[in-house]
Image (cartoon, grey):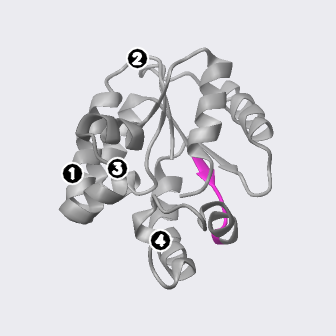
Amino acid sequence: MGAGKSTIGRLLAKELRLPFRDSDKEIERRTGASIPLIFDVEGEQGFREREHHVIADLCQLDGVVLATGGGAVLRPENRRVLQMGGRIIYLCTSVDQQLDRTFRDRNRPLLQTANPRKVLTDLMAIRDPLYREIADVVVETDERPPRLVVGEILERLRSLPPRESRDETALS
């Protein structure tokens, strides 16, 4: 959350001349509802179920850069489908940076609490090992301009051995 997935994903897609897709935006498009409204009506579990179906669908596409929601990695079936779909890039950022980037954003249901720092710290403790487990590339985004991050991603992707899977890139 707040790592720059959408911004960096769009720039990376442009550099790779591939379409960009954002799983959260796709959920909103399909449902006609905002993520916070889905959380309010269906709870996190309902949202995660929708998220899984969207990610599974998007991973069937050839040649896309996909930005997933921050919690997509929690479900083992999401991790599996992402790994089968293509390269996975983990955009890692500190809790301090996440707070700086999200403090005004009311579209982050998990952060609508009295102590967003604790929420982010707890989420990081759970999610970070999962991201690292499936990532082909881990890139730090703290205090770095998006174009610099994209340059590093491109360089690191070029140095990876070829894969037999589709030409897709997922940002987590």
Judged by depth in the image, the label closer to the viewer, 4 or 3, is: 3
- What amino acid is labelled 1 in the image? Glu
Left or right of residue 151, residue 98 in this image: left
Q: Nearer the viewer, residue 48 or 132?
A: 48
Which residue is the site of mark 3? 34
Which residue is the site of mark 4? 111
Left or right of residue 143, residue 29 in this image: left
| SS at circle 3 | loop
Identify the disc placed on residue 141.
none
Provide the residue span drawn in magenta. 90-95
Judged by depth in the image, the label closer to the viewer, 1 or 4, is: 4
Disc 4 to disc 3, C-alpha distance: 15 Å
Question: Mark 2 or mark 3, which is nearer the start of the sequence?
Answer: 3
Give the image quarter of residue 103.
Answer: bottom right
Which residue is the site of mark 1? 49
Judged by depth in the image, the label closer to the viewer, 4 or 2, is: 4
Question: Mark 1 or mark 3, which is nearer the start of the sequence?
Answer: 3
| SS at circle 1 | helix
Q: Is residue 51 above or below residue 108?
A: above
Please report the residue visible at 75 percent of the width from the left and 30 percent of the height from the top. Answer: 155
Identify the disc placed on residue 62.
2
Mark 4 surroundings within 10 Å by alpha-carbon count, few (fewer than 14), some (14 through 19), many (20 or more): some
